[in-house]
Amino acid sequence: MFAIRKLAWITLALVSSFAALSVACSQDPDVVEVIKEVPVEKEVVKTVEVVKEVPVDRIVEVVKTVEVVKEVPMEPTPAPAVMAGPPIYQMGIFEEPITRNFWNYYGGPGGSVWTKYVMDGHADSLFAYSDQRFDWIPSLAADFPTPLIEETVGGEEFWTTEVSMLEGVQWSDGEELNADDFAFTVRTVMDLQLGSSWASAVDPAFVDHVEALDSHRLKIFFKTEDADGSPQTPGLSVWQFGLGFMPILAEHYWAPVVEEIMAASADMEKRHEALFAHVPDGEPTAGGFVFDRWEPGAFYEKDTDPSYYFSGTVITQYANGAYAETNPNTGQTVAHYGEPTGEKLLEYTVGPHSDSSIFSIYGNQDAAILALANGDIDFVFNPLGLEKGFLDRVRSAPDLQVAANANNGVRYLGFNTRKPPMNIREFRQAVATVIDKEFVAQTILQDAALPVYSMVPEGNLFWHNADVPKFGQGMTRAERLSKAVELLKSAGFTYEEEPEISEDGNFVSRAGRGLKMPDGSPVPDLTLLAPSAGYDPMRSTFAIWIERWLNDIGIPARANLTGFNVIVGELFSDTVAEDLDMWILGWSLSIFPDYLENFFHSRHAPENGAGYNWGGYASPEFDDLAIGLLSETTIEGARDKAFSLQRFLAEDLPYVTLFTTPKLDAFRPSRVEFPYTASLGGIEAQGGMQQEAVIK
């Protein structure tokens, strides 16, 4: 709990979003939009109220968790000797973080999953999600916000809402965290036109400005019209699960830095570079941890913040749907979603329960798993999934357990749709058809991967649309080849020699030759960027097979297996539009699927500012559908639009979704105890539970 939202919030490598959604599970009619006519001084004010306290008796419908292993029994063995001393949470990662500058991490080229792990506990937000059940709950907010109302202020029309913030919360340097910090963070994002996850949280198409009415009271102003003058309403994605989850940074530290950057240059690109390059020595934080030191290639260390406001808070969730917090700093119990009585489903005390957290940095997955098996670390962050060999090693190691859950992430093949032939839909459909996901996932990877056809993974049950086009599914090799050639020819591609299949239909006896595009020019040599086998053997395996299958149908493609951070650098480079052809990466996704807009709306292409639409996908029809999702104030309406977007993407294919993996978290129970292990995305999706894990 108390995690920030996106990076899916969106995170690279399995890369963004933290969004979870409690009310999404309910089919209760109380969830629908309520339109009221409220008299205010003889005027009529239209009120849009999204029900904030929603029955959660059917909360399990939000996600489908897969408990394949949950806890793997081991033969009784003596626990390894533990050195005496202060409790330290020993964790492992196997890629270098990119930055410790939060602005860069959340909105610049530092936004990798490895940066996310070490930055967890750095910042907090107005609202958060409860554990496992994903109720929408206040965090730094003192209560739920007032309903949105449409009002006239200074001669202009706005949608407005007010939020009170908790009193007594301190930054790690002892300064008070208050409404000015929130307003400063919003203002900085807008003044510097920051993109990526910042633009998702503070959406400039909807957010106008924020005012601190006093030290602990905010008023938020949303636009009532879009850029074309059409009426619009800030929906769940924009407000409740957007701006409400924005990470808040310290004004008293960052304001002088930002002012100096603004004064030094009027060029926005240079301003971004300067902000992202700033080394935040001495920066105060408010999420339970403060930075200690970072030895590149060796370790990253954080110390516990003794002034953390929520430390010692007892979290209790009840079978009747109630959620309660008892904070020792105030001596008060705050409850939501009903009376906190009856059977308790979950209860634990917020930490941190260690003096420090150390992330040992290993060169690859093999070295990290070996360190875990040898007892050097007690938990390993592994967004890549476990191949059978790695899983067998973990299972055979003394004193280790494995928790298995459904994963809320997807690996994909992306296209630079600005360039031919990737800008031709039938080309993308032909590529999707020839890729045999089931063969690689089930036969080559021995069921370590699960084929995926929709951008919303199956584990996110409420939002997943299973009824989408599935190119190539169930086809034989001969059928795939024939259909791919048919798709290419229907778009005007021509061959000197068409590919041929063997008599038994099991392999291509002659690859296609002389493939030309509709304008008569040869299909150029194409590069497929993908992680190397040392980093992720699953994605590298897919890349090698995709290279083979594309060459079979005459597409001259070459897989370039390289470092993960190298690929990220390419995607964030100034020349991505010209240099990029195809790439394989992945996303660790939010539960509320606003990433369907974040990844594919044309406004998020780098050439239009900054965002995650690296492939430059642009479809006016899709853009209209996607903006409709952002304006939805009801769960059912948002679900219908998310289903439509999934169908559209599976047909148009700016990405070919490839696979996901069961989320397997390996840990050492003799050294670390978690309050729970069953959750969509697993322990890792909760930041390794750095604030909840009890170190023994």
Image (cartoon, rainbow, N blue to C red):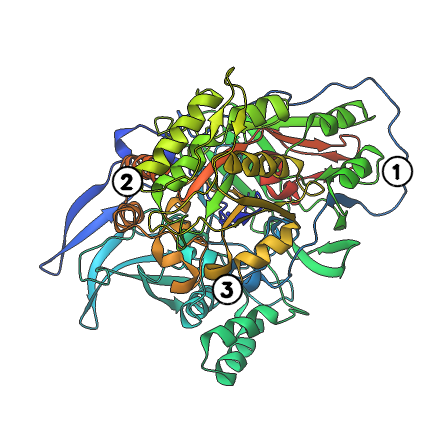
Residue drawn 33% across and 34% down?
A: 647
Quadrant of the image occupied by residue 151: bottom left
In this view of the protein, can residue 473 be seen by the observer?
no
Q: Residues within 10 Å of mark 2 (few under 14, many from 20)?
A: some
The residue closer to the viewer here, 539 or 323, is 539
Amino acid on which the number 2 mark rests in the picture? Thr
Quadrant of the image occupied by residue 376: top right
Q: Which mark is residue 634?
A: 2
Reading the chain from its start, which is encountered first: label 3 or label 2? 3
Label 1, on which residue?
82
- Tag 1 near tag 2, CB within 8 Å: no
Residue drawn 30% across and 59% down?
A: 206
Q: Residues within 10 Å of mark 1 (few under 14, many from 20)?
A: few
Residue drawn 63% across and 25% down?
A: 444
Spatial separation of the CA atoms under disc 3 and disc 2: 40 Å
The residue closer to the viewer here, 20 or 1, is 20
Quadrant of the image occupied by residue 593: top left
Label 3, on which residue?
575
